[in-house]
Amino acid sequence: MGEPSRPRGFNRRRLLLTGGAALAVTTTLTRCGRAESATAATGFGSNTEPFHGAHQGGVDTPAQAHALFVALDLVATPDRAPRDTLASVLRLWTADAARLTQGRPALADTEPELAARPSRLTVTVGLGAGLFERAGLAHRRPDSVTELPAFSTDRLESRWCGGDLLLQICADDPLVVAHTARVLLKNVRTMTTQRWQQRGFRSARGSDTSGATMRNLMGQVDGTVNLRTATDVDRLLWDDGAGQPWFAGGTVLVLRRIRTELDSWDELDRTSRELTVGRRLDTGAPLTGTHEFDEPDLDAAENGIPVIPPNSHVALARHRHDGERFLRRAYNYDDPPTDATTDAGLIFAAYQRDPAQQFVPVQQRLAASDALNPWITTIGSAVFAILPGAADGGYLGQSLLE
Amino acid sequence: MGEPSRPRGFNRRRLLLTGGAALAVTTTLTRCGRAESATAATGFGSNTEPFHGAHQGGVDTPAQAHALFVALDLVATPDRAPRDTLASVLRLWTADAARLTQGRPALADTEPELAARPSRLTVTVGLGAGLFERAGLAHRRPDSVTELPAFSTDRLESRWCGGDLLLQICADDPLVVAHTARVLLKNVRTMTTQRWQQRGFRSARGSDTSGATMRNLMGQVDGTVNLRTATDVDRLLWDDGAGQPWFAGGTVLVLRRIRTELDSWDELDRTSRELTVGRRLDTGAPLTGTHEFDEPDLDAAENGIPVIPPNSHVALARHRHDGERFLRRAYNYDDPPTDATTDAGLIFAAYQRDPAQQFVPVQQRLAASDALNPWITTIGSAVFAILPGAADGGYLGQSLLE
């Protein structure tokens, strides 16, 4: 198998700032200008995201269209320490992910043709809080990696909770996600059992090149407030290693499966919905603004009545101070229903330095009084230490295990 | 809600001939030339497929990237004849699909923003063989619409079989598929129960603009042999009404869920795989050729040994005469596994005038001796009469029910 050519001049920073939309525009302009672009000539399949570096991909990477989250548990074997099994899994995943993300077949890839067009594939690996103890690494568990407190509105189902290991696979092409999952899961099948899989999607890449924020299946613009500057990302997303030096460059993922109660939501009239959310449904603008990215004015009132109700989702989800912010990277899910018309909702992925300071206080406010609560139910929850990135020649988790 | 502008000069014929790839190229060239294209400016979300006409969309429409197949059963109610319930369902679906496919919200659409970018949405409706009797329409059932004979290799699971009604929803954006399913299913929830849902995907639109045929999750190029000319489509795909005049313009769908046994397939070396399939894995070319679309030479031999083994998949799947051909429009599936590493396979959708003459003889040969059989298992099967298209102002099934 040859190595596919990669587009030159791929501007990651621009993508980060404006979302995937910029790429199509850049490409088109290039084609109209002097040079042929490899991307435009053959499609975006040849686009890659870096694998090696201080941080793993799939976190501040502009969200790809498709995501698969798999939680696994380590198999206990009498002849091998869990720590050694863990190291084997992480080495295998690193070797294969380093190749697959760059459009090269995995080692001993049995379907190498499916690896040729990675479509911005990222593979992101995390460790559950409980694994540290099981692997004899309790003293190296970052304080930020711990189970969440109970929230009164949660209706957790064990089939969507927990896990020793997280494997997050994202790409703009679902075929790439499927092949990557196949390779990475089969290589560790004697050492792990799968606990759950969650598949999510956003609007297809190229469907809307205006740069609009994604919509969820309730029709809302979702993810307007996010970390967008390098300063925010450095301060609020990536661990600095002050607590656990090995964890510098890592982050903490809170993954929540939030079912939307569409049957009752659909009975609510449009004005009531907008008051519930605190934003306009058409533009995503706060009720005090005209554009999506306008700052909500929580103090604005008309005839003494707040324009944005104090218990609206926006009013409560909004950070009370700068340190409560985190990176949102949610995906929709829509699975075959068992006993309803629809089984849909949001795979809410929140990345941050410390959930106790960032996600938890926000979620406590929401659980206490979010007007949206009757129409959303959190049925799954898990926390993972997203490992620091791997250096070229190293492997994910090396700073923890060596 | 305003009506989104639709791109002019959308060349359906070119798309039909070359697959979705042509669109991106056309669009790019247009941008470089004199006129701004709405598609290029805002993304492919604004692309539409026609709803009204002699045939339903979603059959000879170039396959979209995402598909959802839902089978439903009519609910028996003491106060209403099944035929009347059926008519109500078909009228509701027609009214909403006519709007949604054109980028307009459904009537009383509760999430109208999700309807604005249809991304070549098609909605295709079919009736199961058993429904004709249940609805007092046994005398109007086309002879071609009947249960398939048993095949020795089938391992059918009832949860993937049968159904009174088929709702097939395809689009290049999974968000559109989800919204459309939500609208169409909730509107009929008092009149129907859902029997099964199957979700499928191909490579994302825009990932590969070379026009290559899709690959399945075994790594094979899949769907090379297909109906490609207007003459073939008229003769082999669309019913001519000779048996049942109301069915003119309809077709018959055989939908098979084929699980791939990837764990054992992956143990087979590459040469053995190619001999099993009869094609090269890299290019999809027959073992007697160099390009995907080269005709397999089933008589070619080297040292007296056939180059393409007589029991290879290609040798047996190939039509013995022109009348055995049918339209293939398969999708990959990759679902959360229950007790294996992977639960993946193919949703094999075959459309034709008469399965007894087209699909069945081919499948009988394959069941008898296909070398690929150890690695594929058909676990679901259903046959549906795909209704003729609806005229503007009419509804799907009108020629049957009036």
Image (cartoon, coloured by chain):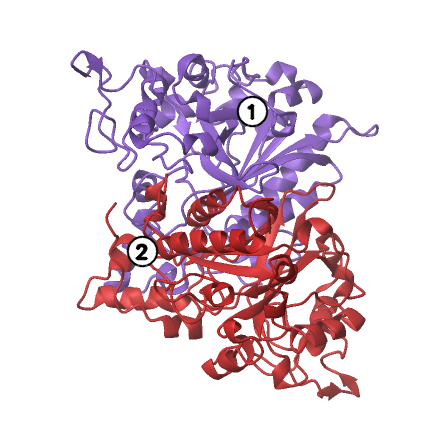
Chain colours: A red, B purple
Q: Quadrant of residue A205?
A: bottom left
Real-space Cα separation, disc 2 to disc 1, in angstroms: 37 Å
In this rendering, is residue B70 above or below A102? Answer: above
- Element carrying mark 1: strand
Residue topped by disc 2? A46
Q: Position of residue A323 (x, y in %)?
A: 62, 83
At a point 59% along the width and 30% down the height, the residue shown is B397
Between B337 and B36, the one nearer to me in the picture: B337
In this rendering, is residue A382 above or below B23? Answer: below
Q: Quadrant of the N terminus of chain A?
A: top left
In this rendering, is residue A64 above or below A277? Answer: above
Q: Amino acid at mark 1?
A: Ser
Between B259 and B116, the one nearer to me in the picture: B259
Query: Which numbered dot is residue A105?
Result: none
In this rendering, is residue A15 above or below A293? Answer: above
Q: Amino acid at mark 2?
A: Ser
At a point 61% along the width and 68% down the height, the residue shown is A141
Q: Position of residue A40 (x, y in %)?
A: 28, 58
**Badge 1: few (under 14), some or many (20 or more) residues near its Cα, within 10 Å?**
many
At a point 37% along the width and 33% down the height, the residue shown is B222
Q: Position of residue A84 (x, y in %)?
A: 52, 53
Q: Position of residue A183 (x, y in %)?
A: 44, 45
Chain designation of label 2: A
Query: Which numbered dot is residue B381?
Result: 1
Between B155 and B28, the one nearer to me in the picture: B155
Between B325 and A324, the one nearer to me in the picture: A324
**Badge 2: few (under 14), some or many (20 or more) residues near its Cα, within 10 Å?**
many
A183 horizontally vs A274: left or right: left
A156 horizontally vs A8: left or right: right
Determine if marks 2 and 1 fall on one subunit: no
Chain designation of label 1: B
Give the foreground label among 2 and 1: 2
